[in-house]
Image (cartoon, rainbow, N blue to C red):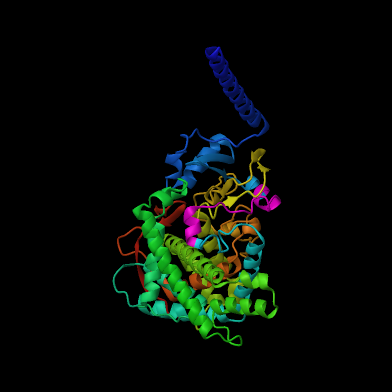
Amino acid sequence: MGHFEIIIGILNIQTVLLGTSIGLLTYYIYGKLRYKSPPGPWSIPLIGDYKIYSNRQMHREVAALSEKYGPVVQISMGPIKAIILNNLEVVIEAMVKKKADFAGRPTFKSGNLFTEGGKDIALAPYNATWKFQKKVAGKALRYYMQGTHLETMISDVCDCVFDRMSKEKEPFVVTDYVDKLVIHMLFNMCFGRKCDLDSKDVNKLLQIDQDIIEKFGSGFIEDIVPGMTYVYKTKRWKDLERLIEEVTTFLRKELKEHKETFNSSNIRDFTDSLILAREEAENEEREENVAMLSDTYLVQILSDIFFAGLDTTRMTLDWFLSYMVAYPEYQQKCQEEIDDVIGKEESPSASDRPNLCFTEACIMEAMRMGAVAAFGVPHATICDTTVGGYDIPKGTMVLINHWALHNDPTFWKNVDKFDPYRYLTKEGKMDMKPENWLPFSAGRRVCLGEPVARTELLLIASSFLKNFRFKVPPGVTHSIKHRAPAAGTELPELYKVVVEKRNN
């Protein structure tokens, strides 16, 4: 009898296991029939599409995949599913028509490390805190940029950098001066620091920024292996922790010094503007707002403005000058326009922008052709939603392939040609912004600093061309070649120039 009971027990266990298996299989098949997932290449379980996501030119590879699978492509980054949008129609559907659905941010271990747990603006989750932070940062930027402050600051930094650059007698890499100019401009804007090309603080931060991009540009295994940092930290991860701690320590020190010398009637820089915002919240006795403006939050907002502005601005200017060297006829046309609009003695100002149409068109074309941030910042869905006829579950990472938009041959005529006239009317004025031109993204997470960025890019670019004529060394032909210092980032190959001081 005992043996019979044992056999019956085994049969019962087998029945339960069989029933469970059939139930899970039925649920899986039902899910497949119910949900229409975006197509994509086959991936290795847990490892994912390694050859794709480890490729620093992944944006080009995914754009090619979209020709086979359509504009909505799904790939696996380790165990993480990522949806990549590759044409304007699906980008507008997701980011504009369903903007709240796609307004979240995915959570990454490295992102949390950079932002002290998502306390910045760029990588923060879509919630009431983020909305308040964005409002405060936008107001602080507008307050600080009132009057002629921006153009005066840029003019002072340009004078400092151009004085050193004009002394170059041999061919040199102009990128070095672009980087110095942009980081000193941001030091002035954020911290009120005047230009000092030999400053240890400035040069150290620039080196840290370049190290983070070039040494860690291929990503981290810690982001795709859950819990890995609790078991084992790679050397790369430890190096990243050290560099981020150095940056955060510097920003905390700047904030502390600004608080000690703060005067609400004399706003010196962007840091002061943030302190003023907190003071106003305190005066209104709104404790929940004050809590969202703690020192940690202010440091992370400063980090966003400083480092996002540093990378995108200097990289865009690298592309702009590279194209000006490659197309001397366009360089000359810009200089003629600058001379006519600005004159011989004055520095460029924001009021000149409506009349610097050809120069701005050249900047826009450089932004189209140069993939500074091919995927922008990743989005995440905050609810179950759809795009392009496919079902996208809540919490899915979604990327915009800006490179694919900017290189779509169905939208751009002669897509591989540098052509600033794309953005101009027949009369030479700025035309409506092309729908497919989206370097600052779109929707709820559109770049906060776009208005300031576009103005400062024009002021700096026109200052370069107002003061110098850029040429390649005698006997050298400048052909634009791309290099990829980080995943989703392309820059022109380093090249040397000679400059002639223009007689202004």
Q: What segment carries the magenta color?
A: 93-114
Q: Quadrant of residue 472?
A: bottom left
- Quick check: is 115 in the magenta stretch? no
**Quick one: 233 or 310, which is closer to the camera?**
233
Image location of residue 139, percent across then percent down: 64, 73
Q: Is residue 87 above or below residue 137?
A: above
Q: Is residue 247 left or right of 458 when viewed as pictured? A: left
Q: Is residue 332 above or below residue 95?
A: below
Q: Is residue 311 left or right of 411 when viewed as pictured? A: left
Counting every numbered tag in the picture gives 0
Q: Quadrant of the C terminus?
A: bottom left
**Quick one: 171 or 126, which is closer to the camera?**
126
Q: Which residue sits at x=40%, y=72%?
A: 180
* Residue 124 showing in the rendered view: yes
Q: Quadrant of residue 142?
A: bottom right
Q: Is residue 283 above or below residue 76?
A: below
Image location of residue 431, percent across then percent down: 64, 61
